[in-house]
Amino acid sequence: MRHSALGRAVALAAVLGLALLGAAPAFGSGFQLIEQNGSGLGNAYAGQAAAVKDASAVFFNPANLTRVEGKQVLFSLEYIGVGTTFTDAGSTRPYLPTTPPTSLPVPLGGDGGDAGGWTPVPNLYMSWQAGKSVWLGLGVNAPFGLKTEWEPTWVGRFHATTSEVKTLNINPTVAFKVSESFSLGAGVSYQKLEATLASAVPYGGLAFAGAAQAGGPAAAAGILAQLGGLPGLAREGEAVIDGDTWTWGFNVGLSAKLGEHGHLGASYRSKITHDVEGTVEFGNAPTFATTGPLGPLGAGINARFANGDVTTQVELPETISVALSYETDKYDLMADWTYTGWDKIQALTIKRADAAQTVVSSVPLNFENTWRVGLGGNYQASEKFKLRLGLAYDKAPVLDEFRTPRLPDTDRTWAAAGFEYKLGEKSAIDVGYAHLFIGEASSNLPNQDSASSPPKGKLIGSYDAKVDILSAQVRFSF
C-alpha cells in the first residue's frame, strides 16, 4: 500500500507539471511567486526558512526536511486574484520626434479595462526519510509567473497588450542531519520558462517616418502612396513574441536549533539564466514594393516587419532568506528577512536570431534589488486546530520612471490569516487567506525608449491594483 501511495504521488507530480505549464500565474513583487505552499500563507510566509515543518521545505529551506518524519506527500493550491486598472492623465498617440503629438492619425484609445484576473498556482512536494540522518525530497512548482492582459485598443497598446511568463520548476533535494541541533540541505532545479509578449505596432507611422528619415520627402511620399494615402498612416496591428527554454539552478539551506524552543534557518536559491529562443509574428503588417526607385527602402521596411526567429536572455534573480522561529506546544512566533537580486534585469532586449542580431525591441527596466520582511504567529487552540496570523512588507524592484504596463508593480503590505486542521494522526489540511494593500503607482513612459527606437506614444497616468490570495493544502504522512 505504501508503494502504491508513492506511485500515485509520482503520477500526480507529472500531471501537476502539465498543469503548471498551462497556468498563467499572477505576479507577486516583481514577478516572483512566493506562494509555494498553503501552510505558510496564513503567516504571510513569514519565517518559512526556519518554521516550515512539512515537505514544502524542499522550496523554502531543504535543511528543514530533517524536521519531517517518515514519508510525506503535500499538495497545495493557491488561488491568486489580481485586479489592475489604469487611469489616463495625458497620454498621447505615437508621434514623430520633429512634429507635434497629432502628427500621425492613430486613435488614442481607452483605459484598457482590468488587466488582471484569478489564477490557480498548484504545487506538489514529497519527502522521504531514507535513513537515520538522510532525507530526500522533490518539489514541482512555479516560482515565477506573470500575466497582464490589456484591451487591444487601449491607450498603452504600443507599449504592451499581453504579457505572460510561466515557469515549471522540478526540484529534487537532499538533507543531512549533521547533529541533533544542526542540518544541511541542497537541491537542483530543472526549470522551464515560457513567455508571450504582445504589443500593437503603428505600421503606417513607422513606415512613413523611416522613409522620411532614409530618403527624404520624396521617399516619404512614395511610401505614403503605397499605404493608400493619409488614412494608411493609421494602419496598425499586433506583434507577438513567443519563446521558451529549459535550464538549471540550485538551492541550499541550513537549519540550527537554538536552545529548547528556538530555530534559525537560512536558505539560498541561485539565479537562473534562461537563453530564450522563439519567434516573432507581425499581424496585419503592410508589404511594400521591392522594385523601382523605392525598392531598397521597401525591402528594408518589409524586413523590419518580417516574421522570424528571435532570442533573448532572462536572468531570474537569486534569493537569500534568514529566518527565526520560537516554538512551544501552545504557540509559535516567526520572523524573516528575504533579499532578491532583481538588478540582474536592466532591460528586455529581443534580437533576431541571425548573424546581424538586429534588435526587434528593447525596453529599459532598470530593476533594483529588493527585500521583504515578515512577522507571523500560530496558536494551538486545540489538539486538532491551529490558528495562523501574519504580516509582511514587500518591496518592488520597479522604479517609477520605468514602470511598464507589462509589470505595473509597486510596494505592498500583506495581512494574512489561516488555520490548520488535523484530519487524523497522519493527515491535515491548511486553509489561508491574504490581502495585499498596494498603493497607487504612477506611469510616465516617454514616446520613445531611446532616440533611435520607434515612437509608442507617451503613457501618462496611474495604476490601481488589488490582490487577494486563497489557499488550500492537504498533506499525508505514511
Image: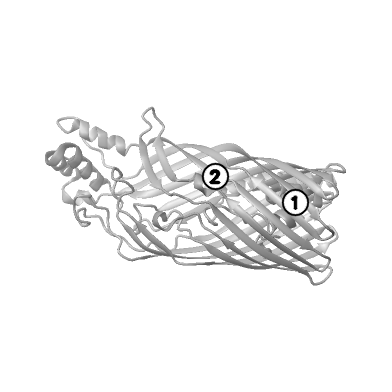
The answer to whether residue 52 is visible is no
Query: What x and y, as percent, mark residue 12?
Result: 70, 47
Residue 199, compared with residue 259, is above or below; it is above
Which residue lies most toward the right here? 132
Residue, x 60% and y 45% (percent of image)?
Answer: 168
Query: What x and y, as percent, mark residue 167?
Result: 57, 46
* Picture quadrant of residue 290: top left
Q: Are marks 2 and 1 in contact (CB under 8 Å)?
A: no
Residue, x 16% and y 37% (percent of image)?
Answer: 215
Q: Earlier in the sequence, mark 2 or mark 1?
A: 1
Query: What x and y, as percent, mark residue 33?
Result: 59, 54
Q: Secondary structure at mark 1?
A: loop
Which residue lies most toward the bottom here? 381
Disc marking residue 55: 1
Query: What x and y, as percent, mark residue 98?
Result: 19, 50
Q: Which residue is mark 2?
A: 316
Which residue lies most toward the front here? 259
Residue count near mark 2 (Cα–Cα under 10 Å), binned few <14, some 14–19, many ≥20? many
The answer to whether residue 347 is visible is yes
> In the rendered view, does 107 fall on the left or right side of 154?
left
> In the rendered view, does 381 fall on the left or right side of 304?
right
Mark 2 to mark 1 CA distance (whole Å) = 24 Å
User: Which amino acid, by three-letter code, is at mark 2?
Assistant: Leu
> In the rendered view, does 165 fall on the left or right side of 49?
left
